[in-house]
Structure formats: C-alpha cells, structure tokens
Image (tube, helix red, strand yellow):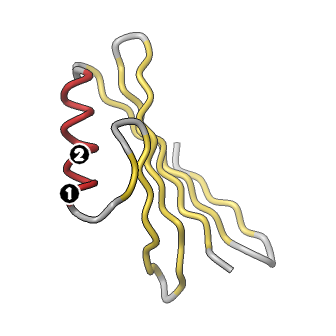
Amino acid sequence: MPGDIEDEDFEAYNILYEYNGLTEKDVEEYMQKLIDSGWEGDSYMVSKNVEWKGKQFKASIEAMGYEGNVCFNCNLVELE
C-alpha cells in the first residue's frame, strides 16, 4: 500500500510491491540489473541517491521473500 510521511524537517515515501511466482534467481537477477545501472548493494538491498521533485533523496529497495511471494520495499528519504 503506497504511503507518505511528511514532516517539516524532511519527507519520506514508501512503496511496497509484491509478486508471486518469482524465484530467488529472478530476484538476484533483478537486483543485479539495478547494481549494473548504478545502484549500490547486493541481492537483498540496493540504494542510490536520486533527485525527485527538485530535491535529493536516498532511495532504497529491499527484497524480502515469504510464503512463495517476493515483496519489494522501496523507500525515498529526503537528504538534508
């Protein structure tokens, strides 16, 4: 469920998306594609500084598997 948190000091956004039928290899290949395109991390979590809406954010994507599903937790936290 998409959500956002706003505070007078910073902004943070979270998006959670879930897939079923992906294998561990599928997830590793997806995360490697992100790393190959400039993200830093490993097969479980990657991060990168990005510009969005004219502001700088730390973006992260974490892959979590459970009950045959894979959930990707994506966060954007405004950098100070």
- Report which residue position mark 1 lands on: 36
Q: On the rendered image, what quadrant is the C terminus found in?
A: bottom right
The label on residue 32 is: 2
Q: Is residue 22 left or right of residue 7?
A: left
Q: Is residue 2 left or right of residue 26?
A: right
The label on residue 15 is: none
x and y percentages locating residue 8 in the rendered image: 81, 78
SS for callout 2 = helix
Q: Amino acid at mark 1?
A: Asp
Name the outermost residue toward the top.
67
x and y percentages locating residue 50 in the rendered image: 43, 74
Q: Are marks 1 and 2 in contact (CB under 8 Å)?
A: yes
Within the image, what quadrant is residue 68 found in? top left
Q: Residue at x 40, y 49 (%)?
A: 41
Q: Is residue 7 left or right of residue 72?
A: right
Q: Amino acid at mark 2?
A: Gln
x and y percentages locating residue 53 in the rendered image: 48, 83
Q: Residue at x 26, y 54 (%)?
A: 34
Name the outermost residue toward the bottom.
54
